[in-house]
Image: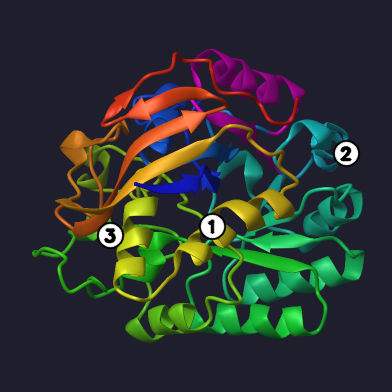
Amino acid sequence: MLKLPGLIDPHVHLREPGATHKEDFDSGTSAALAGGVTLVLAMPNTQPPIFDAETLNLALEAASRKAHCDYAQYLGAGPKNAETVAELAPKAAALKMYLDSTFGQLRLNDMTLWMEHFSRWPGQTPIVTHSESRSMGAALLMSQMYAKPIHIAHISLREEVLLIKAAKERGIKVTCEVCPHHLFLTNVGAQQCCAPTPELTPGRKEVRPRLATQADVDALWANLDVIDCFATDHAPHTLAEKDGENPPPGFPGVETLLPLLLTAVDDGRLTIDDIIEKSVINPRRIFHLPEQPETWVEVDEHAKYEIRAAEMHSRCGWTPFEGWKVKGQVRRVVLRGREAYRDGKILIEPGYGRNVRT
């Protein structure tokens, strides 16, 4: 067995509160453990969004009862809550700003609202932005103006990774993450020769940022040294929703992260050290996360199998990688000294997961 430290996923949507028919802290953290992830950072664009003390407590109370793995909860930047979220910063994973695709109470249409959040956020943890292309450039400018660290979520384009590379070379405090679906899928098909056909339906392809071109994917692989973290943007929706008339964007991903990365290791595109650096060391450093003592993952690195949603733990019941042949299977997870997962079964009770910000 290959023994790895427990992975950290700094970008998951657990849909609680408000959409627990898709996922909740119970099912989502079960999927995390099955994927070798022992710590998740949960996004704030729920229903209601997590953007003040009342909603933060609502999410954390649910997590304290249900979570199987460790966690922290993001706060969302809204048009009128810059002072409130700054005061709550010690209790949060970080601050999330939606500068492109979102709706409702977390939409920031006016750049003066960005300025207020950048000026007030205390800066112990980064401001995490959903920003694409030009809005990403503007966010980098804000970071430099206010001397605040910024973390760019789910980069997907050649121009984005090259801009971040240039910003780092000039000393701007920027880090970034990439998702497996932006490494292994393109807007016309799969990056993997053993991926099954037919391709995803249009509704099941819907994701933000959108799947990009082969040239963009190639640029991400060519500049992995610029990318700090692997993150899934685990965003579960049901098949009925994805196959409906107005399919919501998002893919489930927390349970398939490690098998896909290990398959890339087998293909010679990554190393085990790359996985540890970008899924353990860097997320812990960037988000100031505590060590998880007596925590590790055991992987059968020689196991070959096909990804099947029917065998997975997410409540949404599907995966964009259905039928993909992968090599490397999580067999056992130990979390803080207790056996948490073995061979498909969650072995610890809901509520064992800890809030790492307390």
For label 3, the crowd category at 10 Å Cα-Cα, with few meaning under 14, some 14 to 19 and many 20 or more, is many
C-beta proximity under 8 Å, tags 2 and 1: no
**Residue 8's x, y, as percent?**
55, 45
Q: CA distance from mark 1 to mark 3?
A: 29 Å
Report the residue marked by disc 3.
205
What residue is rendered at 78% in x and 57% in y? 114
What residue is rendered at 88% in x and 34% in y? 87
Q: CA distance from mark 2 to mark 1?
A: 36 Å
The vertical placement of 347 against 204, above or below, is: above
Type of amino acid at the residue the image marks with label 1: Ile
Q: Nearer the viewer, residue 183 or 210?
A: 183
For label 1, the crowd category at 10 Å Cα-Cα, with few meaning under 14, some 14 to 19 and many 20 or more, is some
Q: Nearer the viewer, residue 40 or 146?
A: 40
Q: Is residue 62 magenta?
A: yes
Which-is-in-front pick, marks 2 and 1? Answer: 1
Tag of residue 39: none
Residue numbers of the magenta segment:
51-77
Type of amino acid at the residue the image marks with label 3: Lys
Q: Tell me which label, 1 or 3, sits earlier in the chain.
A: 3
Q: Tell me which label, 2 or 1, sits earlier in the chain.
A: 2
Q: Is residue 19 magenta?
A: no
**Residue 132's x, y, as percent?**
57, 69
Report the residue marked by disc 1.
276
**Residue 211's x, y, as percent?**
36, 68
Q: Tell me which label, 2 or 3, sits earlier in the chain.
A: 2
Report the residue marked by disc 2.
83
Q: Secondary structure at mark 1?
A: helix
Is residue 162 shown left or right of residue 112?
left
The vertical placement of 215 against 206, above or below, is: below
